[in-house]
Amino acid sequence: MRMDAMEAAINALKLVVIFGMMIQAVPLLVWLERRGSAFIQHRFGPNRVGPLGLLQLLADAVKFINKEEFVPGKGHRLLFFLAPILAMMPGALAVLAIPFSTPIEIAAFDFAGSTWGPYLLKVQGADIPLGIIYIFGVSSLATYPLLLAGWGSSNKFSLMGALRASAQMISYELAMGLAVVGVMIIYGTFYLNEMIDMQQGPMNFMFMGKEVIFPYLPNWGIFYQPLGFLLFLVCSYAEANRLPFDLPEAEGELVAGYHTEYGGFKMLMFFIGEYGHMIVSSSVVIIFYFGGYLIPFLSTEDLRQLLTGFVGEGAMLSLATSLVYLLSFIIKLVIFLWVFIWVRWSLPRFRYDQLMDLGWKTMLPWGLLNTFVTMLLVYLAHG
Amino acid sequence: MTSTVLFYLLQFLILASALGVVLIPNPIYCALMLAVSMIGISALFFSLEAYFVAGVQLIVYAGAVMVLFVMVIMLFNLKNEVVAFSKGLLSKVLKVSLSVLIFALIASSLSMSFADLNSSQLQPYESAMRSVKELSALLFTKYIFAFEAISILLILVVVGAVSLARAKGGTHASDK
Amino acid sequence: MPLTSSLTEISLNHYLILSAALFCIGMFGVIMRKNAIVILMSIELMLNGVNVSFVAFSRYQNTMDGYVIVFFVMAIAAAEAAVGLALAVAIFKRFREINISSFEHLKG
Amino acid sequence: MIYQLGPVLFMATLSLLFGVVVLFLVSKVGPKLKPTKAKLESYESGISGQQASTTKVPVKFYLTAILFIVFDIEAIFIYPWAAVFKDFLAEGYGSFILIEMVVFMATLVWGLFYIWKGKALDWE
């Protein structure tokens, strides 16, 4: 699979676009969060700058850029600056592996005196082998920025916040790791694309050698793994360090947690990391349990036939299919991001011991139970 | 050609950070260097098409073991050490030369063997999932005993952890 | 084997020499450093060097056994680090430092 | 092969570069004020004096990390098992591999029970 210069350039451009989208999503999400919280709490939220307050984001950006540079006197300068830079990395690397839509065919074209293509452009940063393992591996690095921020600021509240945050993250990462075992057993693959393909059509499975079909339900993972889904969702909230699990930042006890000493753009970078995490975990939930970019009750074949009437055959068809699926994915993503925000502004905060108890004494045993029940059911269903 | 450049780049990254681990006096930087080295090795496994092992390297080493190291250093709040290295010029020279000697020995013996296995003879794997399945088929049949023994080993670690928990107080308990 | 091809083509030897270098750096750290935690880190480095050679052998000889062994090495290394650091914590609570010379005071 | 690594390295470099460049530019744009002594002190809600080094940090955090490692390794061994479970079932070795994993998991559930009883999971 050698790439020529053009294909490499297209792919590099695609990666830049994906990274830019991740960065761009942050102000939009912040806006959504502020307006959403205002809506929930019966306030107005930012509504002065531009239509619906949308330009508030620009004003905020200008404010962030104009902040004074500050390093605490006793802080470790290198680590203090390294932490926010690294905070963006796990999110960016994990977004890379997420398939947003079906590939687009690009017909052969002439450019700079020679013919290039045809190419198959994936709407995905790169088709990383064993996507789940890769995403888990990369997101397990997310504890470092927190620890470095806590250590680099030389502030006892920062350090305490960092330790709390990392203990919380690893605890819930564990339950998350066990919650997905059920998914792995059901699909028997680690590839995200293959998982999505398996969720086509109506719900059907083999039970005791007989084929069972439920035509009124899509073949989505959530109907096979309801408990796994619940565990995974709660763990992804805890991993993103958001309310009701935002103990590391608990203002009442720890000033502001690991980013007490941070301000301006460095603070924003931690936010980019946090929202990147939200985007990744929402996408992963969609891929595991909600059919990825698939549209319920409409198979890819039907969709292609439907679109042929509008755009005809060939490269345009693949582009149209891809766009429709991308839209479907984005709608699901927005729903899940909204749930993130909704939960944050509706539930009270846990106490730290309650949080750890929930992680170790509830999520972990239930994760083990889910694994056990899934393997037993798969075994029995096989007969 | 690009793959060769990438390989040397990775090799440089891994070895430089490994040297950082043993040469930097401040333990927190040592731990970070080791984490970089682990991530580099994971990338090396990735380039060898051992995707699963690469992921496990990230999850277990970079994500769990190194976090433990960094956490312990933070708990102790270790600053720059006064005595980071062992004392005595003679012993230093001896130790450096011993390490270099062993490396030279291994490297020279390597150059006499295995020289015929180069990358042109590599067959690409059918698919990454296929090789994961082969790996686990081996793990759960041929190495079944070792697999079950791991669970006993983990139980032992748990016992150690609990005994640690029973000892009361924080890290700085003695200075109340 | 001519030198140019050994530079442009990555052979098994490249990986083995990397592995040997990692192992020796780790060993150097073990005999040179005084801090128990850094010594544990150096041991991890040595084990990683061994892992590299296992994976490279497995890849170049087209078997899967090496990968399985790497799994076990990782599990054991993680367990070793956990227990070793638990010892370091115990030592630190007693002597307020983790210089390995503190271990000399341990008597049964 | 190594080309699979390309996008990953590219993305890592991109986000690293973005961070470094942006932080550099922002440090050029922002106002330069000479920091006072009080400002440089670590922020502790106005109460100054206490330093991080005298804080007592509970060993609990470290304990959590150990237990995390133990169960993380367990999860790592379950993943390849989950990948092949259906294949083994199809070939008729389902009971064998099921029992194998049940034994493995039972050992660790026993471990979980032990730490639960040993009060290693209790945060006061």
Image (tube, coloured by chain):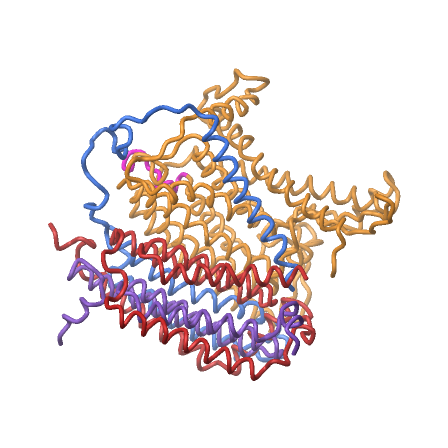
Chain colours: A orange, B red, C purple, D blue
- Vertical comparison of A155 with C54: above or below: above
Q: Residue at x 28, y 69 (%)?
A: B159
Can the viewer see residue A2? yes
> Which corner quadrant of the image does residue A184 belong to?
bottom right
- Quadrant containing the N terminus of chain A is bottom right
- Asked if the magenta segment contains residue D66, the reply would be no
Can the viewer see residue A285? no
Decide which of B132, A224 is in the foreground and name it.
B132
Q: Residue furthest top?
A: A48
- Residue A317 % position (x, y): 83, 44
- Quadrant containing the C terminus of chain A is bottom right
Q: Residue at x 24, y 54 (%)?
A: B76
Decide which of B77, A206 is in the foreground and name it.
B77
The answer to whether B50 appears left or right of A234 in the picture is right
The answer to whether A257 appears left or right of A288 in the picture is left
- Residue C48 % position (x, y): 45, 69
- Asked if the magenta segment contains residue A245, the reply would be yes
Decide which of D66, A355 is in the foreground and name it.
D66
For the record, the magenta segment spans: A243-254
> Which corner quadrant of the image does residue B158 belong to?
bottom left
* Tally of marks: 0
- Residue A23 % position (x, y): 56, 37
Q: Residue at x 75, y 51 (%)?
A: A5
- Residue A61 % position (x, y): 51, 26
